Image: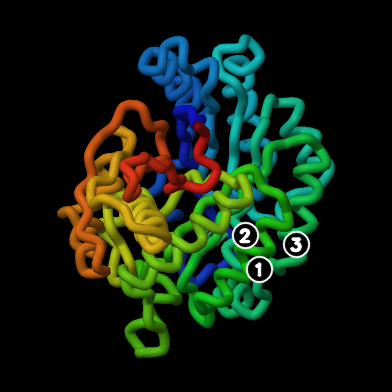
Amino acid sequence: MRHANVAVFVPHIGCPHRCSFCDQRAITGQQKAPTPQDVRDAAEAGLRTLGAAAREAQIAFFGGSFTAIAPDYRRSLLKAAYPFVKSGQYAGIRLSTRPDAIDGEILDELRAFGVTAIELGAQSMDDAVLRQNGRGHTAEATRAAARKIRDAGFSLGLQMMTGLFCDTDAGARRTAEEFAALLPREVRIYPALVLRGTALCDRYVRGEYRPQTLEGAVALCTDLLTFFERRGIAVIRLGLHETPALDASFVAGPRHPAFGELCRARQYRLAVEQAMRGGRFAEAVAVSPKDLSIAVGQHRQNEEALREAGHPVRFFPDAALARGWFALTDESGRPRRFRAVPGAAG
Ligand code: SF4
Protein backbone atom coordinates (compact mmCIF):
# COMPACT_ATOMS: atom_id res chain seq x y z
CA MET A 1 0.00 0.00 0.00
CA ARG A 2 1.29 3.46 -0.89
CA HIS A 3 1.45 6.24 1.63
CA ALA A 4 1.24 10.00 1.20
CA ASN A 5 4.58 11.80 1.12
CA VAL A 6 5.57 15.32 1.99
CA ALA A 7 7.31 16.55 -1.17
CA VAL A 8 10.06 19.18 -1.25
CA PHE A 9 11.26 20.15 -4.74
CA VAL A 10 15.02 20.77 -4.90
CA PRO A 11 16.02 22.27 -8.27
CA HIS A 12 19.53 21.51 -9.49
CA ILE A 13 20.65 25.09 -9.95
CA GLY A 14 23.81 25.29 -12.06
CA CYS A 15 23.43 21.72 -13.31
CA PRO A 16 26.29 21.05 -15.77
CA HIS A 17 24.22 18.64 -17.86
CA ARG A 18 22.03 19.35 -20.85
CA CYS A 19 19.30 16.73 -20.92
CA SER A 20 17.25 17.12 -24.09
CA PHE A 21 13.91 17.32 -22.27
CA CYS A 22 14.93 19.67 -19.44
CA ASP A 23 14.47 23.42 -19.47
CA GLN A 24 17.49 24.66 -17.52
CA ARG A 25 16.30 28.25 -17.63
CA ALA A 26 13.11 27.32 -15.84
CA ILE A 27 15.16 25.48 -13.22
CA THR A 28 17.71 28.23 -12.64
CA GLY A 29 15.44 31.21 -13.17
CA GLN A 30 12.02 30.47 -11.74
CA GLN A 31 12.44 27.71 -9.18
CA LYS A 32 13.31 28.78 -5.68
CA ALA A 33 15.74 26.54 -3.83
CA PRO A 34 14.15 25.46 -0.52
CA THR A 35 15.81 26.47 2.76
CA PRO A 36 16.11 24.18 5.80
CA GLN A 37 13.26 26.20 7.33
CA ASP A 38 11.13 25.40 4.24
CA VAL A 39 11.79 21.70 4.89
CA ARG A 40 10.77 22.04 8.55
CA ASP A 41 7.65 24.00 7.56
CA ALA A 42 6.67 21.36 4.98
CA ALA A 43 7.18 18.55 7.51
CA GLU A 44 5.13 20.40 10.16
CA ALA A 45 2.36 21.10 7.64
CA GLY A 46 2.38 17.40 6.70
CA LEU A 47 1.95 16.42 10.35
CA ARG A 48 -1.10 18.67 10.59
CA THR A 49 -2.75 17.30 7.43
CA LEU A 50 -1.73 13.64 7.69
CA GLY A 51 -2.14 13.21 11.44
CA ALA A 52 -1.18 9.74 12.61
CA ALA A 53 -0.73 8.64 8.96
CA ALA A 54 2.50 10.69 8.84
CA ARG A 55 4.19 7.85 10.74
CA GLU A 56 3.84 5.78 7.55
CA ALA A 57 4.80 8.66 5.20
CA GLN A 58 8.17 9.88 3.96
CA ILE A 59 9.70 13.30 3.53
CA ALA A 60 10.56 13.31 -0.18
CA PHE A 61 13.26 15.43 -1.84
CA PHE A 62 12.40 15.51 -5.53
CA GLY A 63 14.08 17.31 -8.38
CA GLY A 64 16.23 14.60 -9.85
CA SER A 65 19.74 15.38 -8.64
CA PHE A 66 19.66 15.52 -4.86
CA THR A 67 23.08 13.95 -4.34
CA ALA A 68 24.64 16.18 -7.02
CA ILE A 69 23.75 19.50 -5.38
CA ALA A 70 26.31 21.35 -3.22
CA PRO A 71 27.22 19.06 -0.26
CA ASP A 72 26.80 21.70 2.49
CA TYR A 73 23.40 22.70 1.17
CA ARG A 74 22.36 19.05 0.79
CA ARG A 75 23.36 18.29 4.39
CA SER A 76 21.49 21.36 5.66
CA LEU A 77 18.28 20.03 4.08
CA LEU A 78 18.83 16.52 5.44
CA LYS A 79 19.60 17.91 8.90
CA ALA A 80 16.30 19.79 8.84
CA ALA A 81 14.35 16.65 7.89
CA TYR A 82 16.13 14.07 10.04
CA PRO A 83 14.68 15.00 13.48
CA PHE A 84 11.19 14.22 12.16
CA VAL A 85 12.35 10.73 11.21
CA LYS A 86 14.44 10.13 14.33
CA SER A 87 11.46 10.97 16.52
CA GLY A 88 9.25 8.54 14.55
CA GLN A 89 6.94 11.27 13.27
CA TYR A 90 7.76 10.17 9.70
CA ALA A 91 8.82 6.75 8.42
CA GLY A 92 11.85 7.98 6.49
CA ILE A 93 13.28 10.21 3.81
CA ARG A 94 13.06 9.53 0.09
CA LEU A 95 14.99 11.28 -2.65
CA SER A 96 15.63 11.13 -6.37
CA THR A 97 19.01 11.57 -8.02
CA ARG A 98 21.19 10.84 -11.05
CA PRO A 99 22.82 7.40 -11.39
CA ASP A 100 26.30 8.95 -11.62
CA ALA A 101 25.83 10.85 -8.38
CA ILE A 102 25.87 7.78 -6.12
CA ASP A 103 28.90 6.36 -4.30
CA GLY A 104 29.61 4.60 -1.02
CA GLU A 105 30.41 7.80 0.86
CA ILE A 106 27.16 9.48 -0.21
CA LEU A 107 25.16 6.39 0.73
CA ASP A 108 26.75 6.38 4.23
CA GLU A 109 25.77 10.02 4.64
CA LEU A 110 22.21 9.41 3.46
CA ARG A 111 21.77 6.48 5.83
CA ALA A 112 23.04 8.54 8.76
CA PHE A 113 20.36 11.13 8.01
CA GLY A 114 17.46 8.68 7.91
CA VAL A 115 17.11 8.24 4.14
CA THR A 116 15.29 4.99 3.37
CA ALA A 117 14.45 5.13 -0.35
CA ILE A 118 16.47 6.32 -3.35
CA GLU A 119 15.09 6.77 -6.85
CA LEU A 120 17.39 6.93 -9.86
CA GLY A 121 16.45 8.99 -12.90
CA ALA A 122 17.73 6.39 -15.34
CA GLN A 123 15.41 7.35 -18.25
CA SER A 124 16.76 4.69 -20.65
CA MET A 125 19.12 1.70 -20.56
CA ASP A 126 20.26 2.33 -24.13
CA ASP A 127 23.58 4.19 -24.28
CA ALA A 128 22.80 5.67 -27.70
CA VAL A 129 19.49 7.10 -26.42
CA LEU A 130 21.21 8.45 -23.30
CA ARG A 131 23.92 10.07 -25.44
CA GLN A 132 21.50 11.52 -27.99
CA ASN A 133 19.48 13.07 -25.17
CA GLY A 134 22.47 14.59 -23.39
CA ARG A 135 22.05 12.63 -20.18
CA GLY A 136 25.78 12.55 -19.45
CA HIS A 137 25.76 9.05 -17.93
CA THR A 138 25.69 5.51 -19.24
CA ALA A 139 23.40 2.55 -18.65
CA GLU A 140 26.29 0.94 -16.75
CA ALA A 141 26.24 3.87 -14.32
CA THR A 142 22.60 3.02 -13.56
CA ARG A 143 23.40 -0.68 -13.07
CA ALA A 144 26.28 0.12 -10.74
CA ALA A 145 24.32 2.70 -8.72
CA ALA A 146 21.29 0.40 -8.43
CA ARG A 147 23.47 -2.42 -7.08
CA LYS A 148 25.12 -0.12 -4.54
CA ILE A 149 21.77 1.24 -3.36
CA ARG A 150 20.29 -2.22 -2.91
CA ASP A 151 23.43 -3.66 -1.31
CA ALA A 152 23.41 -0.78 1.18
CA GLY A 153 19.85 -1.71 2.19
CA PHE A 154 17.91 1.21 0.69
CA SER A 155 14.66 0.76 -1.18
CA LEU A 156 15.43 1.25 -4.89
CA GLY A 157 13.21 3.14 -7.32
CA LEU A 158 13.88 3.64 -11.03
CA GLN A 159 12.45 6.27 -13.34
CA MET A 160 12.20 5.84 -17.11
CA MET A 161 11.07 8.04 -19.99
CA THR A 162 9.36 6.83 -23.12
CA GLY A 163 9.49 8.56 -26.49
CA LEU A 164 12.90 10.19 -26.08
CA PHE A 165 14.79 11.28 -29.21
CA CYS A 166 16.05 8.13 -31.02
CA ASP A 167 14.13 5.76 -28.72
CA THR A 168 11.46 3.30 -29.88
CA ASP A 169 8.74 1.23 -28.23
CA ALA A 170 11.01 -1.81 -28.50
CA GLY A 171 13.79 0.19 -26.86
CA ALA A 172 11.48 1.16 -23.99
CA ARG A 173 10.60 -2.51 -23.49
CA ARG A 174 14.30 -3.39 -23.35
CA THR A 175 14.79 -0.65 -20.76
CA ALA A 176 11.93 -2.15 -18.73
CA GLU A 177 13.54 -5.60 -18.92
CA GLU A 178 16.86 -4.19 -17.73
CA PHE A 179 15.06 -2.34 -14.94
CA ALA A 180 13.39 -5.55 -13.78
CA ALA A 181 16.78 -7.27 -13.63
CA LEU A 182 17.96 -4.54 -11.22
CA LEU A 183 15.16 -5.54 -8.78
CA PRO A 184 13.69 -2.14 -7.97
CA ARG A 185 10.83 -1.97 -5.50
CA GLU A 186 9.07 0.64 -7.64
CA VAL A 187 9.28 2.53 -10.92
CA ARG A 188 7.92 5.75 -12.39
CA ILE A 189 7.21 6.06 -16.10
CA TYR A 190 7.12 9.43 -17.83
CA PRO A 191 6.34 9.90 -21.52
CA ALA A 192 8.68 12.62 -22.85
CA LEU A 193 7.02 15.98 -23.48
CA VAL A 194 8.36 18.81 -25.62
CA LEU A 195 8.90 21.84 -23.38
CA ARG A 196 9.83 25.33 -24.50
CA GLY A 197 13.53 26.11 -24.37
CA THR A 198 14.73 22.50 -24.53
CA ALA A 199 16.91 20.69 -27.08
CA LEU A 200 13.95 18.43 -27.77
CA CYS A 201 11.92 21.52 -28.66
CA ASP A 202 14.61 22.71 -31.11
CA ARG A 203 14.56 19.32 -32.79
CA TYR A 204 10.76 19.32 -32.83
CA VAL A 205 10.67 22.74 -34.48
CA ARG A 206 13.24 21.61 -37.06
CA GLY A 207 11.13 18.54 -37.80
CA GLU A 208 13.78 16.12 -36.50
CA TYR A 209 11.79 14.84 -33.54
CA ARG A 210 8.25 13.54 -33.44
CA PRO A 211 6.81 13.05 -29.96
CA GLN A 212 4.66 10.04 -29.12
CA THR A 213 0.95 10.42 -29.75
CA LEU A 214 -1.25 10.22 -26.67
CA GLU A 215 -2.72 6.92 -27.91
CA GLY A 216 0.74 5.49 -28.63
CA ALA A 217 2.10 6.53 -25.25
CA VAL A 218 -0.92 5.11 -23.39
CA ALA A 219 -0.61 1.80 -25.27
CA LEU A 220 3.12 1.49 -24.58
CA CYS A 221 2.92 2.63 -20.95
CA THR A 222 0.04 0.20 -20.28
CA ASP A 223 2.24 -2.64 -21.56
CA LEU A 224 5.08 -1.45 -19.32
CA LEU A 225 2.71 -1.13 -16.35
CA THR A 226 1.55 -4.71 -16.77
CA PHE A 227 5.12 -5.91 -17.36
CA PHE A 228 6.30 -4.44 -14.05
CA GLU A 229 3.27 -5.46 -12.02
CA ARG A 230 3.60 -9.06 -13.20
CA ARG A 231 7.06 -9.02 -11.64
CA GLY A 232 5.85 -7.56 -8.35
CA ILE A 233 7.34 -4.13 -9.09
CA ALA A 234 4.99 -1.27 -8.18
CA VAL A 235 4.43 1.48 -10.75
CA ILE A 236 3.98 4.51 -8.51
CA ARG A 237 3.62 7.17 -11.20
CA LEU A 238 2.59 7.29 -14.85
CA GLY A 239 2.91 10.70 -16.54
CA LEU A 240 4.10 14.06 -15.27
CA HIS A 241 2.26 15.97 -12.55
CA GLU A 242 0.26 18.86 -13.94
CA THR A 243 1.74 22.11 -12.65
CA PRO A 244 1.49 25.78 -13.72
CA ALA A 245 5.15 25.52 -14.85
CA LEU A 246 4.31 22.59 -17.12
CA ASP A 247 1.33 24.49 -18.44
CA ALA A 248 3.52 27.50 -19.26
CA SER A 249 6.24 25.57 -21.08
CA PHE A 250 4.33 22.73 -22.76
CA VAL A 251 4.69 22.65 -26.56
CA ALA A 252 3.78 19.15 -27.74
CA GLY A 253 3.63 15.51 -26.75
CA PRO A 254 1.41 12.95 -25.00
CA ARG A 255 0.21 15.12 -22.14
CA HIS A 256 -3.00 14.31 -20.28
CA PRO A 257 -4.01 15.37 -16.75
CA ALA A 258 -5.07 11.80 -15.93
CA PHE A 259 -2.46 9.90 -17.95
CA GLY A 260 -2.08 7.18 -15.31
CA GLU A 261 -5.82 6.64 -15.20
CA LEU A 262 -5.92 6.19 -18.98
CA CYS A 263 -3.27 3.47 -18.71
CA ARG A 264 -4.99 1.72 -15.82
CA ALA A 265 -8.33 1.84 -17.66
CA ARG A 266 -6.71 0.32 -20.75
CA GLN A 267 -5.08 -2.37 -18.60
CA TYR A 268 -8.49 -3.20 -17.14
CA ARG A 269 -10.16 -3.31 -20.54
CA LEU A 270 -7.51 -5.62 -22.02
CA ALA A 271 -7.91 -8.01 -19.08
CA VAL A 272 -11.71 -8.13 -19.51
CA GLU A 273 -11.34 -8.60 -23.26
CA GLN A 274 -8.93 -11.48 -22.76
CA ALA A 275 -11.22 -13.16 -20.22
CA MET A 276 -14.23 -12.73 -22.51
CA ARG A 277 -12.34 -14.39 -25.36
CA GLY A 278 -11.69 -17.41 -23.15
CA GLY A 279 -15.31 -18.58 -22.82
CA ARG A 280 -19.00 -17.70 -23.08
CA PHE A 281 -20.05 -15.24 -20.40
CA ALA A 282 -22.98 -13.02 -19.54
CA GLU A 283 -22.57 -9.35 -20.41
CA ALA A 284 -22.62 -8.09 -16.83
CA VAL A 285 -19.12 -7.66 -15.37
CA ALA A 286 -18.87 -7.36 -11.58
CA VAL A 287 -16.03 -5.14 -10.35
CA SER A 288 -14.85 -3.81 -7.03
CA PRO A 289 -16.74 -0.54 -6.32
CA LYS A 290 -13.35 1.16 -5.99
CA ASP A 291 -12.43 0.10 -9.53
CA LEU A 292 -15.69 1.06 -11.21
CA SER A 293 -14.52 4.30 -12.85
CA ILE A 294 -11.28 2.67 -14.08
CA ALA A 295 -13.23 -0.34 -15.39
CA VAL A 296 -15.75 1.80 -17.27
CA GLY A 297 -13.03 4.18 -18.53
CA GLN A 298 -13.19 7.92 -19.17
CA HIS A 299 -16.37 8.81 -21.08
CA ARG A 300 -17.26 5.08 -20.93
CA GLN A 301 -14.37 4.42 -23.34
CA ASN A 302 -13.87 0.85 -22.14
CA GLU A 303 -17.51 -0.13 -22.64
CA GLU A 304 -17.34 1.42 -26.10
CA ALA A 305 -14.10 -0.38 -27.06
CA LEU A 306 -15.37 -3.71 -25.71
CA ARG A 307 -18.59 -3.33 -27.66
CA GLU A 308 -16.59 -2.70 -30.82
CA ALA A 309 -14.55 -5.83 -30.07
CA GLY A 310 -17.80 -7.84 -29.93
CA HIS A 311 -18.24 -7.82 -26.14
CA PRO A 312 -21.14 -5.49 -25.27
CA VAL A 313 -20.51 -5.56 -21.51
CA ARG A 314 -22.00 -3.62 -18.63
CA PHE A 315 -19.92 -3.02 -15.49
CA PHE A 316 -21.54 -3.04 -12.05
CA PRO A 317 -20.07 -2.69 -8.56
CA ASP A 318 -19.84 -5.72 -6.30
CA ALA A 319 -18.54 -5.08 -2.79
CA ALA A 320 -17.51 -8.74 -2.47
CA LEU A 321 -14.69 -8.20 -4.97
CA ALA A 322 -11.25 -6.93 -3.94
CA ARG A 323 -9.55 -4.16 -5.89
CA GLY A 324 -8.01 -5.37 -9.13
CA TRP A 325 -10.50 -8.25 -9.56
CA PHE A 326 -13.59 -8.70 -11.70
CA ALA A 327 -16.10 -11.51 -12.06
CA LEU A 328 -17.92 -12.93 -15.08
CA THR A 329 -20.85 -15.34 -15.03
CA ASP A 330 -20.43 -18.41 -17.21
CA GLU A 331 -23.08 -20.36 -19.11
CA SER A 332 -24.00 -22.50 -16.12
CA GLY A 333 -24.59 -19.36 -14.01
CA ARG A 334 -21.35 -19.77 -12.04
CA PRO A 335 -19.34 -16.61 -11.30
CA ARG A 336 -15.67 -16.79 -12.28
CA ARG A 337 -13.15 -14.36 -10.89
CA PHE A 338 -10.28 -12.83 -12.88
CA ARG A 339 -7.42 -10.48 -12.06
CA ALA A 340 -7.50 -7.17 -13.93
CA VAL A 341 -4.32 -6.00 -12.22
CA PRO A 342 -1.40 -8.45 -12.04
CA GLY A 343 -0.49 -9.18 -8.46
CA ALA A 344 -3.75 -7.75 -7.05
CA ALA A 345 -4.28 -9.18 -3.57
CA GLY A 346 -7.42 -11.10 -2.84
S1 SF4 B 1 17.21 16.80 -16.03
FE1 SF4 B 1 19.34 16.82 -16.75
S2 SF4 B 1 19.79 18.94 -17.31
FE2 SF4 B 1 17.91 18.97 -16.06
S3 SF4 B 1 18.64 19.33 -13.97
FE3 SF4 B 1 18.49 17.10 -14.21
S4 SF4 B 1 20.52 16.41 -14.87
FE4 SF4 B 1 20.41 18.68 -15.16
Residue type of the residue flagged with mark 2: Ala
* Percent coordinates x, y for residue 306 in the rendering: 25, 62
Inspect this view and state whether residue 265 appears: yes
Q: Which mark is residue 125?
A: 1
Residue type of the residue flagged with mark 1: Met
Q: Is the residue marked 2 within 8 Å of ligand 1, measured from its CB?
A: no
Q: Residue furthest bottom?
A: 207
Q: Which mark is residue 211?
A: none
Q: Nearer the viewer, residue 210 or 251?
A: 210
Label 1: state its secondary structure.
loop
Residue at the image point whose x is 43% and y is 24% from the top: 42
- The residue tagged 2 is 122
Residue at the image point whose x is 50% and y is 75% from the top: 169
Q: Is the residue marked 1 within 8 Å of ligand 1, measured from its CB?
A: no
Residue type of the residue flagged with mark 3: Ala
Q: Nearer the viewer, residue 99 or 14?
A: 99
Instruction: Work out how far the residue at label 3 is from the one at label 1, CA to CA, in angstroms.
Output: 10 Å
Residue 96 higher or lower than 51, as above or below: below
Disc 3 or 1, which lies upstream in sequence?
Answer: 1
Decide: marks 1, 2 in contact (CB < 8 A)?
Answer: yes
* Percent coordinates x, y for residue 109 in the rendering: 76, 33
Instruction: Work out how far the residue at label 1 is from the one at label 2, CA to CA, in angstroms.
Output: 7 Å
Instruction: Work out how far the residue at label 3 is from the one at label 2, CA to CA, in angstroms.
Output: 9 Å
Q: Nearer the viewer, residue 142 or 224?
A: 224
- The residue tagged 3 is 141
Disc 3 or 2, which lies upstream in sequence?
Answer: 2
